[in-house]
Image (cartoon, helix red, strand yellow):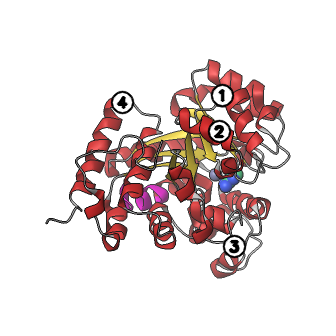
Amino acid sequence: MSSAGAGMPSMIDFDRISRDRLPALLRSAPKAELHIHIEGSLEPELIFQLAQRNGVALAYPSVEALRAAYAFTDLQSFLDIYYAGASVLLKEADFFDMAWAYFQRAAADNVVHAELFFDPQTHTARGVDIGTVIRGLHHACQRAHAELGISAALILCFLRHLSEDEALATLDAALPYRHHFIGVGLDSSERGHPPEKFARVFAKARALGLHLVAHAGEEGPPAYIESALDVLQVERIDHGVRCLEDPALVRRLAAARMPLTVCPLSNVKLCVFQDLSQHNLPALLDAGLCAMVNSDDPAYFGGYLNQNLVETFAALPQLGARQAYQLLRNGFEASFVAADKREAWYRMLDAAFAGAVTAG
Ligand code: ADE
Ligand code: ZN
């Protein structure tokens, strides 16, 4: 498939959308966000507020000192500080407040659909009941729908640095809340923890009718993407940017229209790419892959969804209106929603781009 891409509407003349209109168009267009760790949306200000509310001691004296520590050299250096930040989350209201803050920012970015990752093991390890976590997040999803018009869903992630037995116990503990989450994912330290380590728990989740996704090919090799597909049978790959090292794998991903939830600012902050101008997003689209842009852990990586989009397009002159449309459409295509909802979003997206075409 060429860079013309799947599902491109023939009636929109993308060549007549000038580059200088792109930032405003990217900001105002309707969007789906499919790769956001809700614990990664915890801003330093809220970390301090919750620490005070819950009497939790922090290793940093101030918001500024904490923010200054956000200089990461790789995934693990980030995860260490990310898990420390999450230590302030104890009560249902804390999980609600965190997710509600995210939804307000997402609404400002014109996100109309969000599938939120959450890491229950980060909290149950500190004695927090899994029901406390899920109920707080679920209430925020309900309020986001009612008050902001955002359709929202939860995806429970297993921490891959822990054992599969612990993941199985987590899934069992979450089953009373089965109706509050739509899928399972796999995150945390990638290297040395291949997807196949979680074959049984993903088989069990599949049997329960849950959607399946996994981080693969962020820091780990293309072989991890293959085993996420072959062993875990995932429906989306989170990140997946290292797939380009294996041309046969790229062909397979493109033929299957396997979504890759790419996170450009995250990739730069975690040193997967040296800077945004080096990012392989244009090459992923040129290869016909179903890639889209996401924020990953926006409180830690320098921005929410619109920031990711606008900065990425500013840094990569190969990306124009056609690619903007394709990325946003891919986000809706890859979302776990009913077809009629998706079709309605495609129409909204078409209207946004058609409105940006200059006359003449
Ligand atoms: N948990 C939160 N953010 C993550 C990322 N980018 N990769 C793996 N695990 C994560
Ligand atoms: Zn992630």
Please tell me which of labels 3 and 1 falls first in the chain.
Answer: 3
Please tell me which of labels 2 and 4 falls first in the chain.
Answer: 2
Residue in the picture at 74% in, 34% down: 227
Horizontal arrangement in the rendering, residue 245 relative to residue 102 (left or right): right
Residue numbers of the magenta segment: 101-112
Is 266 part of what is drawn in magenta?
no
Tell me if mark 4 has few (under 14), some (14-19) or many (20+) residues whose alpha carbon lies within 10 angstroms of its own: few
Q: Which residue is mark 4?
A: 339
Query: Amino acid type of disc 3?
Result: Tyr
Of helix, strand and loop, which one carries label 3?
loop
Query: Amino acid type of disc 1?
Result: Gln
Please tell me which of labels 4 and 1 falls first in the chain.
Answer: 1
Name the dominant secondary structure of the magenta segment. helix
Q: Position of residue 332 (x, y in %)?
A: 41, 42
Query: Amino acid type of disc 4?
Result: Ala
Q: Position of residue 47 (x, y in %)?
A: 62, 66
Distance of label 4 from label 1 (alpha carbons): 22 Å
| Dots 2, 4 in contact, CB < 8 A | no
Please tell me which of labels 3 and 2 falls first in the chain.
Answer: 3
Q: Which residue is mark 3?
A: 70
Q: Which residue is mark 2?
A: 185
Q: From this viewpoint, is residue 107 visible?
A: yes
Tell me if mark 3 has few (under 14), some (14-19) or many (20+) residues whose alpha carbon lies within 10 angstroms of its own: some
- Depth check, mark 1 against mark 2: the one in front is 1
Distance of label 3 from label 2 (alpha carbons): 25 Å
